[in-house]
Amino acid sequence: MLFQPINKNYHEFHIDRDKDLCINCEVCVRQCSYGSHYWDEVRGKVMHDNSKCVGCHRCEALCPTAALHIRKKPSEYRGGASWRPVFMENIYKQADTGGVLLAGMGSPVDIPVYWDRMLLDASQVTNPSIDPLREPMELKTFLGAKPSKLEIETGKDGKPKLKTKLTPQLELNYPIMFSAMSFGSINFNLHRAMARAASELGIYYNTGEGGLHKSLYKYGQNTIVQVASGRFGVHKDYLQAGAGIEIKVGQGAKPGIGGHLPGEKINDMVSETRMVPIGSDAISPAPHHDIYSIEDLLQLIFALKEASEYKAPVSVKIAAVHNVAAIASGIVRAGADIVTIDGMRGGTGAAPAMTRDNVGIPLELALASVDQRLRDEGIRNQASIVAAGGIRCSADAIKAIALGADAVYIATGALIAVGCTLCGRCYTGKCPWGIATNDPKLAKRQNPDIAAKKMTNLVRAWGHEIEEMLGGMGLNSIESLRGNRDKLRAVGLSDTEMDILGVKHAGR
Amino acid sequence: MKRVYPDKEFCIGCHLCEVACITAHSESKDVVIAYTQERREKGITSCKKVFEKGHTCVAVSCRHCDEPACVAACISGGLHKDPKTGRTVYDREKCVGCWSCLMACPYGAIKRHPVENKIIKCDLCQDREEGPACVAACPNLALKFEER
Amino acid sequence: MKYVIIGNGIASIGAIEGIRQVDKENPIMVIGAENAPAYGRPLISYLLAGKIKADRMALRPTKFYELNNVELKLGTTVAGLDTQKKIITTEKGEEIEYENLLLATGGAPFTPPIPGAEGAGVYNFTNLAHAQELIGTAKDIKRAVVIGGGLIGLKAAEALFDRGVDVTIVELSDRVLSLAFDENAASLAAGRLDEVGLKVRTGVSVKEIQRDAEGYVVGCHLTDGGFLQTEIVVIAIGVVPNYNLAKDANVKVDRGIMVDDHMRTNAEGVYAAGDVAQALDMLAGENRVVPIWPNAYNQGFCAGKNMAGRDTGYSGGLAMNSISFYGLPTISVGTVNPPEDDKNFEVAMKLDEKKKSYRKLVFQNGNLVGYVLVGDIDQAGMFTSFVKFKLPIEAETRAKLMAGEPDALHWPDEFFNETWNPEHTEE
Ligand SMILES: Cc1cc2nc3c(=O)[nH]c(=O)nc-3n(C[C@H](O)[C@H](O)[C@H](O)COP(=O)(O)OP(=O)(O)OC[C@H]3O[C@@H](n4cnc5c(N)ncnc54)[C@H](O)[C@@H]3O)c2cc1C
Ligand code: SF4
Ligand code: SF4
Ligand code: SF4
Ligand code: SF4
């Protein structure tokens, strides 16, 4: 304790070890990658250093006797409504380091979560509800541009036939996909798991900006390959390996800034896939240096369509920012088949804390305004909308669909399914759950057999819940809910908020 | 027959299998009592051994070989192959603690009992209805109990 | 009779179990000169020491023979063998036809011509009867001399000492355990015996056994002129293969009965296994008599399978001994005393006399070919794997071995997976 910076003891967590239960098995010692637990030779027992704990709960989860509890440190500052402890602690840190505060995972700040302020409808008397266990229920969703009108002709066999040629579509068994998390930011085991789960479920996972390892090409039918400003791992085979292509313009957690994968995370496999040297930092610039206008974006969209021989729909992903509706409109007009809106609560492997917590707008508002704008302009059919960033449960997903999304992306949810506890230290590369790390010793904590199973279970479970809620509303297909804001009612929202969301207040 | 197969690709070296083995072979079947009191007083020892090399770990125990070197070496009849179950069975009563099996088993699967002049060897948790405790305890599916 | 086995030791048990792996039906006949069902021969020292009771000697459960459809003729010595007619004849004149015959007659104690050795008071120590006799005698005597400081001699001495007898071991070479162990290990073992109170005389031998007028043993004259008072003498110099039956029947014999890589002798349908056989030694790459228990079982097992018609090669025996001296465990495997001037061998040793702990590793052309452990023997099996499977040893592996931490993760990857986790599929 001596000779340490004075703020060393102002740490966030406190390790509680129940003396009656701890058997000194050292399981916690081996699990903690931050060295919080240790074997004390002199005392002859396992001890800990609270200041090292990041609150990941790995030790608590694996302790065979449940002897551990990780708590927020009980000591408190006087603080006040304005000087909340987090600001003080940040200042202590920055006064020590002189550096930018880094953060991982989605923003924890207290900005309204509109999902919690909107409620779903259900049928009573006048229209019967449907029991999904007895009657067919359709969750199938197609992503891609839809024609403005359909022409039907009579085929040679005398049966009606679709005359209009459809552009490529992504067919989803559930309106849920695994969102972009690059290989490198999370490790190969989880990519394997997502790929397997997506195949098993009949949905898609997004490669993120780190390229696609050759051994995963076989899951291409369920893969969306991403092209970001760093262009890591982008080549013809890559573009043709997936069923869909996504241009990443922005990310909800850090709108306006690029990415930085530290050299320590670039091992041989990451290097091979990303096409960058082992150990060198992989930096994604803030903008795409070939996109300075909607016209530039149009060129890239068609370059990618050309490269993939028009077999894959192209999505453009943007962060939810102030002018999101107008930007989305431009994107659709530039030829995108899918627009992905990433809200400010979306996850990240590493972002400057100030950006994460203060830039962008909540997904719900962005989604509603984009959907409305595309409708108003009569181009809603030209692209599907995928909502991402902070979908926490099936109700959030179904509300997003009612607000106008065709499908949702989940990233944080998928990681929580495999153990993530949102400790937010993804950028350290020491993730004790073996998620946001390429350290082989930690990465193997994610056995793809288990991870794929958990991700599959999660989406299936949500699928059941969505069916249940749809049935409750008397609907038998997710299509019938899409953009059907009449199925939502707000509680405790202002007129402006309700206006943007396009929902009535509960009771109306 | 079903055997326990360790997977070195996904063993995370947590040693929970050892804790489980000790508990399963204790009298109390209580992890706290087994690991502390019974281990100290009765010398209960895990049949598993966890090896670690760089970032690779693996937890091994008796393979229940088809033609076991330990049985060939046992001078007392304390080890034999059960013709019905195929397991390599250890009879504590007969063992004289000559350590011939410990020397002969090239899988390092035999340990000395810390208190008695006897050996310790995996019995596939024969008295445990749910099957091997180590397999159940492994948090990462690095041990599989199956027919191969 | 489809299967006939002469001898009822561990090689015989191995053979029965080998045959039954392949052929569950045809009857087996086992003929044994001794009167007991197969027992743990090495256990006779435990019996003599009083550490175990007679009921724990049997190697297999009482029902073993019955369950395996084995006809057991005990107390019966086979006197003749006709490999042409495929008939054996017992001492009592009974003739038994065989289709497949296993000679598992083991070894016979070697007794050098020492004047005075003939007569009462001089014992061997290789079978149950010897042990029982000595148990009877030990009550009435104060002193014993054991000739031979090998494994059997030391175990006999220790056992007698446990019965309250004042024992002196006489060993011709300059140290005990000269064959299986090296100098350091032997001196630790000798030290342990000395601590307990056993006396060891090395570099001398018994010239003559002195008897009194009534013929009772009174002492031994030593080659260095000394004299040791004693009431009994136990001769434990070694065993020699018990091959006369075979030799007389023109079965090819060298130091033991010669067998090929299927445990077959040169006579059709005749196999040999155990202490009597001269079979492949893994490290030597040639046939040797290595009279140890695991080899006897394995050879019997291999012979049994071949007798029952399953073509099974013998991968070769590996010399190994595990023996404890008053709680001090010692293990030696493979080549432990390499020729001193041979540059292909390298030896690494770690001796801690205080802790009575010793480790010696012998490498030949980079491979581990033998080791000795005293005291801390827990890693023995893993060391054995490197010898037995002839695993390649890289610098890192070698460092681990030298540190006394042999490790399965230092096996070649492929071999590891085949062994521990077969059908491991990579993505
Ligand atoms: C005291 C002692 C301690 C030992 N300790 C160890 C040890 O710790 N580790 C180790 O590896 N080895 C040890 N050995 C050696 C080990 O016991 C032998 O290697 C093993 O017993 C050999 O088995 P076998 O079946 O080949 O022969 P044996 O066990 O010698 O059996 C042969 C049997 O055949 C019978 N027989 C012989 N001729 C005939 C005939 N003509 N007709 C009928 N029956 C016949 C004999 O009576 C005998 O019962 C020890 C030996 C002794 C004596
Ligand atoms: S894992 Fe639990 S029981 Fe084991 S040392 Fe840590 S706190 Fe104690
Ligand atoms: S103890 Fe060793 S030799 Fe015996 S069955 Fe188990 S792994 Fe095989
Ligand atoms: S230690 Fe026990 S089980 Fe092992 S060989 Fe000796 S007697 Fe048999
Ligand atoms: S419990 Fe599983 S992961 Fe942990 S050490 Fe044992 S085998 Fe390895």
Image (cartoon, coloured by chain):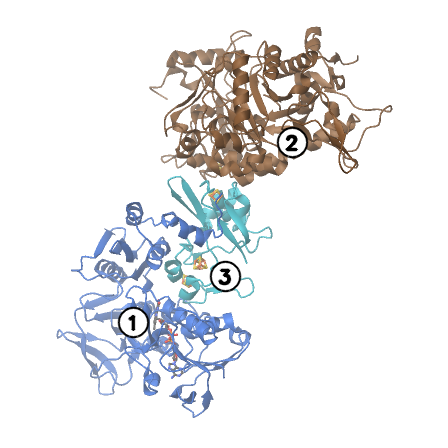
Chain colours: A brown, B cyan, C blue
Q: Quadrant of residue C384?
A: bottom left
Give the x, y percent position of residue A497.
68, 9
User: Marks 2/3: CA distance?
Assistant: 56 Å
Kindly report which numbered mark, 2 or 3, lies closer to the viewer in this rendering. 2
Question: Label 3: chain?
Answer: B
Residue B25 higher or lower than C113, as above or below: above
Residue type at mark 3 is Val
Q: Nearer the viewer, residue A213 or A432?
A: A213
Mark 1 CB within 8 Å of ligand 1: no
Residue type at mark 2 is Glu
Labels 1, 2: one chain:
no
Question: Label 1: chain?
Answer: C
Circle 2 packing at 10 Å, graded few (<14), some (14-19), many (20+), is some
Q: Nearer the viewer, residue C50 or B73?
A: B73
Kindly report which numbered mark, 1 or 2, lies closer to the viewer in this rendering. 2
Is residue C274 in view? yes
Is residue A22 in view? no
Residue type at mark 1 is Arg
CB atoms at circles 1 and 3 under 8 Å apart?
A: no
Mark 3: secondary structure? strand
Query: Label 3, on which residue?
Result: B89
Residue C288 image label: 1
Give me the residue at 38% from left, 71% from top: C296
Residue A483 higher or lower than C7, as above or below: above
Residue lying farthest left? C225
Kindly report which numbered mark, 1 or 3, lies closer to the viewer in this rendering. 1
Give the x, y percent position of residue A159.
78, 35
Q: Nearer the viewer, residue C1 or A176?
A: A176
Residue lying farthest bottom? C93
Labels 2, 3: one chain:
no
Residue A171 image label: 2
Give the x, y percent position of residue C57.
44, 71
